[in-house]
Image (cartoon, rainbow, N blue to C red):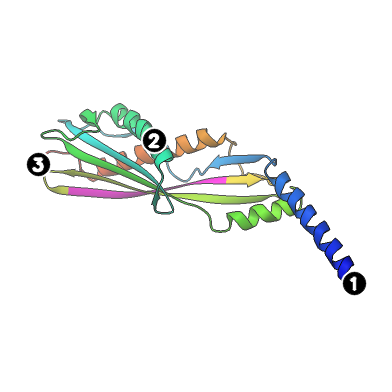
Amino acid sequence: MSIANRLRALRAASAALAVCVSLTGCLSMKMYVDPTLPTVAKKDIAPVATPKPVQLLAEFRTKGNANARATAELRPRALAVVNESGLFSRVSAEAAPGAGQLRIVIDNIVADNAAAKGFGTGLTLGLAGSMVTDGYNATVSYTADGKTTETVVKHAIHSTIGNKAGPPGLTPMEAQSAVHLIMDQIVWNGLKQLNEKHAFESE
């Protein structure tokens, strides 16, 4: 092949790749919340005999790094769940005399192969769809009277792009709704697990 023909072929391939990548952005994405983690509500948590006030600290991270935008979404959701749980007499973002400290840290472990799968889907114009999974590892801890009790909660979201069926039996959700549900379920499960460890009982 002559140099001129090679250049024309390279330009054509580059143009095709650009079209594929741009189309990938237009392909529909559907998100599914993993059903493994139990659904927990107030009725599933044993009441505390003498609820104490608590300082709530909540942080969201992405691959171990602070994510300010996601943290801003997590905090009010965590506050709503902790208040609804009835485990504490008062919930505040500030420290107070006699108050325990509840700390919730959620780390989104992005799937390492997400970019590669998305690229492959783009090259096939969505005909060969793909599914990637984002893991959410959370540490929920409660400190009071010099004692800290900790539990780990794991969750996940499965996302499909292009012509790919979702996990059987799961209903697709809009992205923000899926993430909010993940946050709520993690907090509920964390509270239940800590309560089962008798973390909120007075000495």
Quick one: 136 or 44, which is closer to the camera?
136
Q: Is residue 145 left or right of residue 116?
A: left
| Whole-percent x, y for residue 104 in the image | 31, 43
Q: CA distance from mark 1 to mark 3?
A: 84 Å
Q: Secondary structure at mark 2?
A: helix
Q: Which residue is mark 3?
A: 203
Q: Which residue is mark 1?
A: 2
Q: Which residue is mark 2?
A: 72
What segment carries the magenta color? Answer: 148-158
Give the image quarter of residue 80.
top left
Judge depth for marks 2 and 1 and give the one in front: 1
Quick check: marks 1 and 3 in contact, CB under 8 Å?
Answer: no
Q: CA distance from mark 2 to mark 3?
A: 34 Å
The N terminus - image quarter: bottom right
Give the image quarter of residue 172.
top right
Q: Is residue 82 left or right of residue 121?
A: left
Quick one: 76 or 193, which is closer to the camera?
76
Residue at 24% of width from left, 32% of height from top?
A: 87
